[in-house]
Image (cartoon, helix red, strand yellow):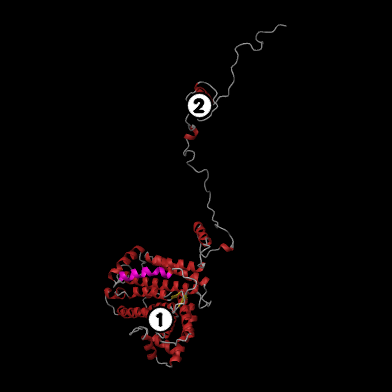
Amino acid sequence: MVVAADDTPGKGKPKGKQYTRSRTGCLTCRQRHQKCDETRPVCGNCLLVQRQCEYPTAVLPLRERRKKFLPGEQQPWTNAATISRAIGPGTSVATRPISMAYRSDALFHYFYDLEDPFDVAPKERRQSLNIATLCFTECAMGNIVASETHLDGLMRFMDLHRPPHATPAESDLDDELANRYVLFSYNFIHGFKSRVEDVLINGSVTKTSQTPSPALVEKLMHEWHKHEVQGLDTRLKALKMIPFFFSELPPNTKFVDVDGTAMAECLATLTATAQLRTQGMDFDDQQMIWQEGAATRLMLAFVGSHIESLSTHGRKASVPNGSRMASSWSGMAAATGLYLHTVLRFWNAGEPIEPRLHRRVLLVLQQDLERSRRTSRPLNDLWFWKAFVGAMSVERQTASPARGVVNEMKGVYEGFVREWSIIIGTTAWEQARAALSRIVWPEVYHSEDMAQELWYRCVS
């Protein structure tokens, strides 16, 4: 059998070993037309013969180079539409009294749930203390609107955790401290607001309807002590003592009566200088009520008497027996603020007291009057002065649209005045006015007719 030469198997040049083309191999192997194992940073061929191994730099394809945005410069997705939905759990337990952003709500949960197991202070007392501290902080920064907002929040918190209709125990330390935070904060804010109002508006610095900026108020605060009698010394003493007001108290702390003489002396000075406000004098004479320094000394007396009222080891009251100015701190502070607002009419810049705050102050004063009535101490001039100031405050508030909040207190305070009249055995306004003057009362009172009418309605 003859086989053709072309059909002979294996005839011709032997074929070399077949390799798959490598597109990502190193440059050295590609130049030598060798199969690269693409091991980085040095491939196996270059490592075997000790050659320099280099890989080509990545180059974007022409299709990618012509794009408007390079890869990675544009997000792979976009929001087609914004969907409004509630963030957080949808249960009724998570309902907030105000709308809060997601981050604020998260911080709220963190603050509310993070509890110190070794903290002996109740949560409600600590939170009321924090809110009261914010009131002072905003005042120190000149932001009156923010301080009033915190004070309003403090009243809402108090109404929730300590309802006005609940009668606390007489020895309840938490309730007494919470009331003191409210009384001290509201007197400080209302006095601060009145001074800013007099300096800025009466001094033609701002218009009546214009709210002063915090920066302007803070600048004025740094100048006040230069014009006030012993202003710097009094402020430094008050700043040194204020931490004692907000410090934690031992569990065996008891509250004792204080001597209200220091507060009454400050009120007497403010009453005398307040007469200049109604005489139409110039701006400098109008500022005498602040430059004399009685308002600042009153704040110092608040803190000092608070410290004196604390008894931790069975210490008795520092007030002498039979003193005519003996009173609880809360009762004296509440009556002082109401006197400055109702009788002198310059606390809180002459504006009405917020109804919830007014009701709380009147309830604190009512508890003080009832406690004093149960003791062996007779109903002296100070007791009548506090009762009549409270009755005047309710009488003035009943003329406002928010009279419904405190209208229920009207009969209570008129009953206090009537009780004093029966015990003393007098129905004459002249004798009642003399008793008020022995504590503090203006010689020329712009609402004399209202006071006289209130007296005769109580004793009739």
| Marks 2/1: CA–CA distance | 99 Å
In which quarter of the view is residue 334 placed? Answer: bottom left
Residue that numbered label 1 is attached to: 319
List the single residue furthest toward the bottom.
425
User: Where 433 sits versus 170, above or below?
Assistant: below
Crowding at dot 1, Cα within 10 Å, few <14 / some 14-19 / many 20+, comes out as some
x and y, in percent, of residue 128 in the image: 47, 68
> Is residue 106 visible in this depiction of the protein?
yes
Quadrant of image for the N terminus: top right
Amino acid identity at mark 2: Cys
Report the predominant secondary structure element of the magenta stretch.
helix
Q: What residue is at 27 percent from the left and 77 percent from the top?
A: 281
Crowding at dot 2, Cα within 10 Å, few <14 / some 14-19 / many 20+, comes out as many
Residue that numbered label 2 is attached to: 26
Local SS, label 1: loop
List the single residue furthest toward the right.
1
Amino acid identity at mark 1: Val
Between 176 and 274, the one nearer to me in the picture = 176
> Is residue 460 visible in this depiction of the protein?
no
x and y, in percent, of residue 376 in the image: 47, 86
Q: What residue is at 38 percent from the left and 70 percent from the top?
A: 241
> Of callouts 2 and 1, which one flags the residue occurring earlier in the amino acid sequence?
2
Q: Which residues are magenta?
A: 231-245
Local SS, label 2: loop
x and y, in percent, of residue 190 in the image: 39, 72
x and y, in percent, of residue 90 in the image: 58, 60
List the single residue furthest toward the top.
2
